[in-house]
Amino acid sequence: MNMLIYLIPIALLMGGMGLLAFLWSLKSGQYDDLQGAAWRILAEDETDERKP
Amino acid sequence: MTCCTMDAESVLALSTTSSSAEEVRLASQPLGEGLRQLDLSVPDVHCGGCISTIERALLTLPFVKTARVNLTARRVTCVYQEEIETRATDPSKILAAINSAGYRAHLFTPSAPENDKTRNQLLLAIGVSGFATANIMLLSVSVWSGADAATRDMFHWISAMIAAPALVYAGRFFFKSAWNALRHGRTNMDVPISLAVTISYAVSLWETVHHGEHAWFDASVSLLFFLLIGRTLDHVMREKARAAINGLARLAPRGALLINPDGSRRYIAVEEIAVGDEISIAAGERVPVDSVVVSGESDVDLSIVTGESSPVAVASNSEVSSGAMNLTGSLVLRATRIAKNSLLSEIIGLMEAAEGGRARYRRIADRAAALYSPVVHLLALVSFLAWGILGGDWKQAMLVAVTVLIITCPCALGLAVPVVQVVAAGELFRKGIMVKDGSALERLAEADTVAFDKTGTLTMGSPRLVGVDTMDESATAIARGLAEHSRHPLSQALVRDTETAPISFDSVTEIPGGGLKARNGADIYRLGNTAFAGGTSFVPRTADSPYSEVVLSKNGVDLARFFFDDTLRPGAYEATDRLGAAGLETLIVSGDRQTVVDNTAHALGIDRAFGSLTPKQKVEECQRLNGQGRRVLMVGDGINDAPALAAAHVSMAPATASDIGRQAADLVFFNERLDAVPEAIAVARRSASLIRQNFALAIGYNVLAVPIAIAGLATPLIAAVAMSTSSIIVVTNALRLNAFGKRRDMKIRGGIGRSAEVKAA
């Protein structure tokens, strides 16, 4: 019974971490080009950014 | 593998998509620190190979900082430096680089990114409601498995605390829409949803406060979760198509070279051109505003403006309308109207006026809601009163009423339509057809008459050599040698459709509005229209025939005559055939000459063909057919078709269509073949029947579940399981559309003209 006091907050915290991870991925534009992302996995190197 | 292959015609077209550095700079947005961002539409990107080819090609340019291809929207976002070591860079090299990699690239102005924001908000809402659902379910399972009084209360309180913000945040889409509908005296699907969610939360809270056994927090949150999935799918489908359609080439030019009174030239935006301004238009550019020719001679291509298939010669004082393509010589024009009053804008006005017919269309989901929600509310009210009066326990009555509201909540109904439409839109997308929104699919399934435009739709708008009339065998070789020096569509057709080795000449000059003139020793050859080639001595043989005629003369003597016809779009026969076989009536409405239109109609076996129609007459023809109770699918591409596209019950346009033609159309097909039309109808009809099945499943579920709820036998567990099961069944049924698409021999199925009637119980 007493362990619920720990377990429920832990469960909520872990769920909340999942939610935050989702929010972050959404904000960083990871869902903007789903088709392109599927193909980019196959590309050998990242070509979109020029090395300084 | 068809990916990344280009046909000869698109390679030819590459040379005409050049833009000046000023125009490109005008189209890009400043980012600060000397950087600018350029957004380009690249309609040909298909695969991962395309992505890396384009990105690599751009990054080899020294002034390009970043380049990123978005495959979903078929766009390239490129950030470049305005100047390197104090020298201004030439951003038109970006387009040139993409062109030389083998892709067409077009400038476009990104619309406000608001649309994407809605999608992100919806995804956020799904995330939040999903999180809440998962956690509350966890607690609920503990309660169901026998948590006792104090623990149960605590679990209920935690659930209530998780549910409250989730409901407010994720439910606001439904609350807003429901409130909006109620305020205007209407009802829609969102009204019962909002009611069920808020009432069940309120009752659950009341129960929790009074140490009740049951609470429905899990039901109200998971309901929102499922409904948001449907809402998001609906939204994503619409946005995906819209982005791809809007991102294509713009027909209207964004600027022109203004000639100042002192002779200096300056590139200005179209909106800044005033009446009386003189502008210079080079060969290959489009005319930005309605104007008259001040100096210069040329041929203009009006096919996209009026549907007239052969180019028209213009000289001093000729009027040219906006959107016309200048073909052979450069022109100086004086603007007679500003951009806002030009032909393009007039057509847009006509289009808006014509859209009335379509605006009255109500989506299937809304029609279902109109029947469904009063029934549900009545059921809940009746069971509340019946339990209260007969049983005397008003608290129990309230619980039963809430259970009825939850169990009948249109979760499956809310998913029934969008899931099918998203699957259908994905299926069509793979076939190269974009659907603007779900209601277009519903309307397409109902179409029973197809009206085609001719130029650019049934035909490619590019001429083809169909006959040579000559006594001299070498005439073709001479003509071909001449034609190779010109960009006129007839010359290009002559080169493409003849196989003899061309003869070379000492000198060749192109006379705009006439044709080509060449010297070979003492002989003068002329290739062009009758007046140019032979002066007044030649009589055109094709005054009222459907063909365009080109004459070759040597020192004023008639040598050969070439006849041209417009090429039929690939798949045009098959398309009209399949439409006929499926019981759809076909007709042609065109702005081209009647003889030309009759010729095309004859070739395709279409009985009814109307030629020389103005945009307004096309609209009237659509409305006349509508008046006869027919549902017209209009297929067209030009500016002159746009009002009719907007007026018809549903409309389709090829991707090569004018900008406003694509805007007006409900569906846009990217492949060249006209087969897209019957294929789209087949998928639309299939999805209409799947939607009907889904409604039947959802209603069947209600028929089973409602009596249980009214009898007061439903526990929260049963309600939750039943609700999820019905949703999953509906989704699984929708996925059957994929299997249908994989079958080779697709036939148009389903009842003709039968609208998807919804009988909600």
Image: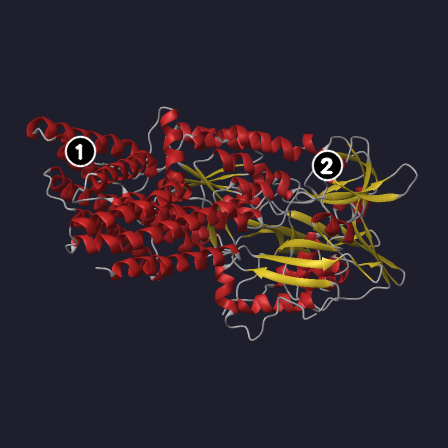
Disc with the residue nearer the chain's start (1 vs 2): 2
Residue B318 placement: quadrant: top right
The residue drawn where x is 74% and y is 55% is B33
**Contact? badges 1 and 2 (CB < 8 Å):** no
Q: Position of residue B132 (x, y in %)?
A: 33, 51
Name the residue at the left extreme: B390
Distance between the alpha carbons at the discs numbered 1 and 2: 63 Å
Q: Amino acid at mark 2?
A: Glu
Mark number displayed over residue A46: none
Q: Say whether residue B17 is visible.
A: no
In the rendered image, the vertical position of residue B705 relative to residue B558, given as above or below: above
Task: Check the image and name the residue furthest to the right.
Answer: B262
| Circle 1 Cα neighbour tier, 10 Å, few/some/many (<14 / 14–19 / ≥20) | many
Residue B705, percent from left and from top: 15, 43
User: Is residue B620 in sight in this rendering?
Assistant: yes
Residue tagged by mark 2?
B271
